[in-house]
DNA sequence: AACTAATTGTCTTTTTTTTAGACAATAAAA
DNA sequence: TTTTATTGTCTAAAAAAAAGACAATTAGTT
């Protein structure tokens, strides 16, 4: 298990990731809790090395949790009012993980982890089927939860999630990013259901099909025979350039 | 002149403000340069006190420069890759301003101001006629420059400005914030010219008038007689709530 | 093999929104 | 009184979005 050396990281600054996935017609979020203590839920997060860019730090956080690289990542907001103080449970666990921790430096470490943090919020879009959550890393347990079934989380993480979802909605069709949540091939209906999950509202089937095909970013493949007693839909693939 | 005590501030974190104003049919930005040295241009910025929220810090930066409070402020992005290192001129000036500076702590101070900074970008909208730029504060000289006449600035400040303008454009009519750039009363034509300056494109007069009036956020006041040989336009005021 | 149920793919029609065109109503100068 | 320049509004045209309609399939049922 990796440890944190506080000296290498920028103090007072953290990163929180809203990792979105899509499965069973539901938008999911990967959340974590520590294996010890009461186990309060949190968004997967991390700190920024003094020698790395923040986007790089966010990628690292993501790779540590999901094993995936080259994931769609978007920074959406900075959080952190003056009341955002690390709470006792989190503090105890952080301390235990600090290799720099030493009785001699107790004061410094305490100051570091107790002080107010400013957090940069990122959201990531992943193909949920490719992810194998690395449980155990950093003593945390990861779980995919439906956007409609998010528990109370630590700090202002529920608020961060709300902002992240809002950012996703604003970017979804404007930036053509939705395909990052889907497998390589999919039917029109599946994209529509994804859109309905993200926006939490229905779309008219006929018009949605036209709109999505008029974007000219989909390549039609073979038909998908499901065994259902109806016309088999075509499979499509997203064309990158 | 105020001084900085580095101990009170969060290290590695700064705030940069894109302060927008509107005058002579042009969108303006308030930029600054130090009175000493070569005088490289920069966006007005500052640091975050360990005891204050970032929005509060941004307000403070704004008040220090413009004297204004309760200004429309919006955070739009975080900047800061690993290459963003304080350059020598800026460093020299910062050192001179640090009251905490002392030969004994030379190393600490140098580390503080030399290290990489992560910067939170804010944009502000102000009625340019209310602003009296506080030249001399923090040894800087302030100047309103047209968006089409922005000089090369320090660090990645030109890039930050570009992102700030993009954020302004995205929010302008969606959020009804444009009125923050105008005086209390104005004609329809004046709002239209503001929109044209922000989006850098013309709008059809007849349709713009309809669109803006259909928002039902303007109160019609008396006519404005300019002395021009044509029908006098009405003055309007923005209704809050 | 014919019939039925459950979609899908694609049109056409309707409605709404956006854009363009037209013109009377000023205000002040000639 | 006539002319010039621009404003406030209306109507017409064009484009986009939403709703409606229906043939084409797939596989189960009779």
Image (cartoon, coloured by chain):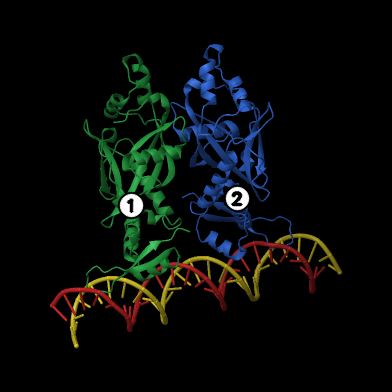
Chain colours: A blue, B green, C red, D yellow
Image check: A137 left or right of B221? right
Q: Is residue B22 visible?
A: yes
Residue A48 position (above or below residue B230): above
Kindly indicate the quadrant of the structure image that contains residue B214: bottom left
- Say which residue appears at 52% left-offset and 17% top-offset: A107
Residue A33: numbered disc:
none
Q: Residue furthest front?
A: B222
Q: Nearer the viewer, residue B37 or B232?
A: B232
Q: Measured from the top left, where is residue A208 in percent x and y?
A: 58, 61
- Subunit of mark 1? B
- Say which residue appears at 68% left-offset and 45% top-offset: A149
**Which residue lies under the disc numbered 1?**
B127
Residue A185: numbered disc:
2
Kindly indicate the quadrant of the structure image that contains residue B123: top left
Q: Measured from the top left, where is residue B29 in percent x and y?
A: 30, 47
Residue A224 position (above or below residue A92): below
Instruction: Look at the numbered disc 1 and give the secondary structure of its residue.
Output: loop
- Say which residue appears at 57% left-offset and 42% top-offset: A159
Q: Measured from the top left, where is residue A222 in percent x and y?
A: 61, 55
Q: Nearer the viewer, residue A197 or B211?
A: B211
Instruction: Look at the numbered disc 2 and give the secondary structure of its residue.
Output: strand
């Amino acid at each position: 298990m990796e440890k944190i050396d506080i000296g290498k990281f920028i103090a007072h600054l953290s990163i929180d990731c809203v990792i979105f996935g899509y499965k069973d017609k539901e938008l999911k979020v990967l959340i974590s809790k520590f294996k010890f203590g009461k186990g309060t839920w949190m968004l997967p997060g991390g700190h920024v090395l003094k020698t790395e860019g923040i986007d790089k730090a966010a990628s690292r956080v993501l790779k540590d949790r999901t094993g995936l690289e080259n994931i769609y990542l978007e920074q959406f907001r900075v959080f952190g009012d003056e009341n955002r103080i690390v709470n006792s449970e989190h503090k105890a666990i952080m301390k235990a993980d600090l290799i720099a921790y030493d009785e001699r430096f107790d004061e410094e470490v305490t100051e570091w982890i107790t002080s107010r943090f400013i957090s940069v919020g990122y959201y990531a879009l992943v193909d949920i089927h490719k992810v194998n959550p690395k449980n155990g890393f950093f003593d945390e347990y990861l779980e995919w939860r439906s956007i409609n079934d998010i528990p109370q989380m630590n700090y202002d993480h529920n608020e961060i999630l709300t902002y992240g979802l809002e950012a996703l909605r604003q970017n979804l069709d404007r930036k053509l990013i939705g395909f990052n949540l889907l497998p390589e091939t999919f039917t029109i209906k599946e994209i529509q259901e994804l859109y309905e999950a993200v926006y939490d509202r229905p779309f008219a089937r006929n018009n949605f099909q036209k709109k999505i095909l008029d974007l000219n970013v989909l390549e039609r493949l073979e038909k998908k025979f499901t065994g259902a007693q109806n016309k088999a839909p075509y499979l499509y693939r997203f064309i990158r350039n």
